[in-house]
Each structure stands twice: as structure tokens, then as C-alpha cells.
Image: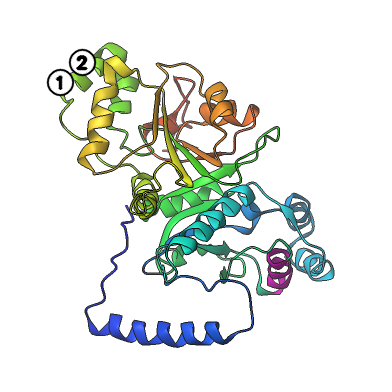
């Protein structure tokens, strides 16, 4: 899985990178703009979002699917001065920007910030409308990757991506297979008011923060065997899951606020929302987080109860889960949900094994 980026620069390549960055910084500082310059990628927490998650492009997508690429590009060029409407990732991106504002208030030369990258397979001709839309909403997004119809996932590591958000589940799966935290975003069925001063991120546990090793036991051997297994291995940390490194990156930024005695005013809050039972299987989860040196602000053990009603109270900017029936229940009640296609849970729906197509001889 993707790791926290090193902050030291010791070899020759890093020395050259430092010189290039110093030149870029000087150029940006000389520009007559009120926008803050982007942080150095090596130190930043990089969030890559697709154009269809950042903006609502349902109508444009329909043109592409029904009339083809040329008509799609022509439509985008013709309407490039019309801002696109906000998409499912828009509130999350705004919350990231708010955290950056708070960090810059505390640390004037701080480089440990969120860096938002637009990662899209759109043609460069469409880039003008995307840029105009970003400027219309005053979003701080300076780095783009437009791949002209090819999958952009091959560039994620080059952009030092900590989290990739897309509407395309195949691209998300590609990213996870490359060891990059990623999820497929879904628009909620109703709109609820989200915090404008605190980034709220909710995670499922198994197959999201942790591996699916315990979930395999539940699916194959039942709950009683699972409870016995978790009790026996309570002091053995679970292996990491695909989103562990993103929680780690959030914790790194949280500690910047704690260092200024602002724990209670921290604009980042994290939640563990798990179907596990606390008494029967919760200790191993909490001890695993402790062994990793990570904190979670709120841990909610539901013992199999639906997650949607609780998430409706939390109101996260994003909720990560590996099972689609939890995603569906969340978005029905207004939660912005992101599916993590990882682990044995992909073979099941509502606890039942999904029939796989027979292999051809």
C-alpha cells in the first residue's frame, strides 16, 4: 500500500528536485495572485480526483456514450464558458481546502498540506472548461493530468497520490492493485448539510483500514468461529488494508494541530464505523490501531446494525466501505459514500455468495 512520503532529501536526485522546486516557488511567489501556491508534492497529502467526481457531468457523459468522442469534445468546447455543476467529491474538496487554510494560519511556511490533483482521461480540449469551472468556484487545484481517453491510473504513483477518487470502478480496482488507496464515489439520494469548518471522514474497518483476513473467517466459517478467532488473536495486529495509509496521512496533519494545542479545535475528525461487536471482537481492532501508532477520534461498533442511520448523524464528507449494501444504505440517507473494491466481500451481497459465471472449457 502507498506509504507516507519521506520529508528528507539526501541523494543527488532529491537535490536536483529541490532546485527545481525552489525555482517554481520563486516563479509562483512573483505572480500577482491571491491564491496560495501548491505545496511540494513530496511533503503533501495528495488527493487525486476525477473530473466526474469533482463535477456533475452526467449530461456530458450521456453525449459521450450515445454520440461518441468527437460530439462530446465539441459540446464541451462550445460550452466551455459555462461552469460545470458541483459533483459528489466537491464538498470533500472544499473541506480539504479549509484544512489547508487553517494550517497556513498556524504555519506560514508549511508544506504539509493537502494537494488536490485533477486526474482525468478527458481530452486536453476539454481542459479549458474544467479550468474555467475550477476558477469559477475558486478551487485551489493547480496540478492536472489529462490523458486523452487512456486510463490515468498509470500516473498516480508519479503524482505521489495518497488517495484516488473516481466514478469508474475499474480504474479504482487498478489503483488498489498498484497499492494506492482508492474508492468509487456514489452520489447520495438526498442532500444534507455538511460541516464547513471540519473535515469528517468515516471508515469501515475490515477490508478498508484492515485486511479482509477476519472477514474471510466470518464468510467461510460463521460468527462463532470468528469470535473465537478474534479472542485468540486479540494481541496480534491485523494486517493493513487499502485505506490504512490514508488514515495515517490524516493523522500526520492532525498532529500539526495538536502541536499547537488545538486538539479540540482540529478541523479533521475521523470515525471508525464497523459492523463488529465491541465486546466480542472490538479489542483487536483498537489494539491494531494502537500498534500502528494511529488514533481514531470516534469508534462506533454496531454489532451488525445498519450503518446508514448513524452516518446520517455523523454527516461525513466521505464514508469508505467495502460492501455495496452498506454503501447503498448510506447514500439512501444522504451520506456521500465511497466503495473500496477489495477483499472477499466483493464475492458476497447481504451475506450471500454472488453466483459467479461458469468458466468456459
Q: Which residue appears at 29% of the width and 23% of the height? A: 282
Q: Residue furthest right?
A: 78
For disc 1, the neighbor class at 10 Å (few under 14, some 14 to 19, many from 20) is few
**Tag 1 and tag 2, C-beta contact below 8 Å:** yes
Classify 339 as above or below 246. Answer: above
Residue that carries the numbered disc 2 in the rendered image: 228
Classify 47 as above or below 185. Answer: below
**Left or right: 106, with 8 as reference point:** right
The one of 10 and 25 positioned closer to us in this rendering: 25
Magenta segment main secondary structure? helix
The one of 164 and 114 positioned closer to us in this rendering: 114
Residue 343 point in image, percent of width and height: 37, 36
One can see residue 138 in this view:
yes
Residue 338 point in image, percent of width and height: 53, 41
From which residue to which does the magenta span run? 125-135
**Left or right: 45, with 337 as reference point:** left
Amino acid at each position: 500500500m502507498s506509504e507516507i512520503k519521506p520529508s528528507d532529501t539526501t541523494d543527488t536526485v532529491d537535490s536536483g528536485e529541490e532546485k527545481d522546486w525552489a525555482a517554481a516557488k520563486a516563479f509562483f511567489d512573483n505572480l500577482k495572485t491571491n491564491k496560495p501556491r501548491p505545496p511540494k508534492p513530496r511533503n503533501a497529502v495528495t488527493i487525486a480526483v476525477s473530473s466526474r467526481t469533482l463535477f456533475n457531468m452526467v449530461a456530458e457523459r450521456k453525449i459521450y456514450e450515445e454520440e461518441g468522442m468527437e460530439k462530446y469534445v465539441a459540446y464541451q468546447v462550445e460550452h466551455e464558458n459555462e461552469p460545470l455543476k458541483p459533483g459528489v467529491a466537491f464538498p470533500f474538496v472544499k473541506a480539504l481546502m479549509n484544512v489547508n487554510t487553517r494550517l497556513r494560519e498556524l504555519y506560514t511556511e508549511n508544506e504539509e498540506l493537502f494537494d488536490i490533483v485533477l486526474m482525468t482521461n478527458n481530452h486536453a480540449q476539454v481542459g479549458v472548461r474544467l479550468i474555467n469551472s475550477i476558477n469559477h468556484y475558486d478551487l485551489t487545484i493547480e496540478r492536472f493530468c489529462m490523458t486523452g481517453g487512456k486510463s490515468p491510473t498509470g500516473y498516480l504513483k508519479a503524482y505521489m497520490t495518497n488517495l484516488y477518487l473516481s466514478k469508474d470502478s475499474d480504474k479504482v480496482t487498478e489503483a488498489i492493485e498498484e497499492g494506492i488507496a482508492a474508492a468509487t464515489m456514489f452520489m447520495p439520494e438526498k442532500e444534507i448539510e455538511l460541516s464547513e469548518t471540519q473535515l469528517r471522514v468515516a471508515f469501515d474497518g475490515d477490508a478498508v483500514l484492515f485486511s479482509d483476513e477476519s472477514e474471510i473467517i466470518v464468510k467461510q466459517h460463521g460468527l462463532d468461529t470468528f469470535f473465537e478467532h478474534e479472542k485468540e488473536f486479540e494481541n496480534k495486529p491485523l494486517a493493513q488494508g487499502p485505506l490504512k495509509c490514508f488514515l495515517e496521512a490524516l493523522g500526520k496533519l492532525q498532529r500539526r494541530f495538536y502541536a499547537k494545542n488545538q486538539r479540540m479545535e482540529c478541523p479533521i475528525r475521523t470515525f471508525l464505523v464497523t459492523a463488529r461487536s465491541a465486546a466480542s471482537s472490538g479489542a483487536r481492532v483498537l489494539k491494531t490501531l494502537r500498534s500502528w501508532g494511529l488514533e481514531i477520534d470516534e469508534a462506533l461498533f454496531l454489532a451488525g446494525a445498519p450503518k446508514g442511520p448513524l452516518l446520517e448523524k455523523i454527516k461525513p464528507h466521505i464514508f469508505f466501505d467495502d460492501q455495496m449494501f452498506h454503501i447503498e444504505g448510506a447514500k439512501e440517507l444522504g451520506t456521500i459514500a465511497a466503495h473500496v473494491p477489495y477483499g472477499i466481500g466483493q464475492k458476497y451481497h447481504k451475506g450471500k455468495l454472488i453466483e459467479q459465471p461458469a468458466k468456459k472449457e
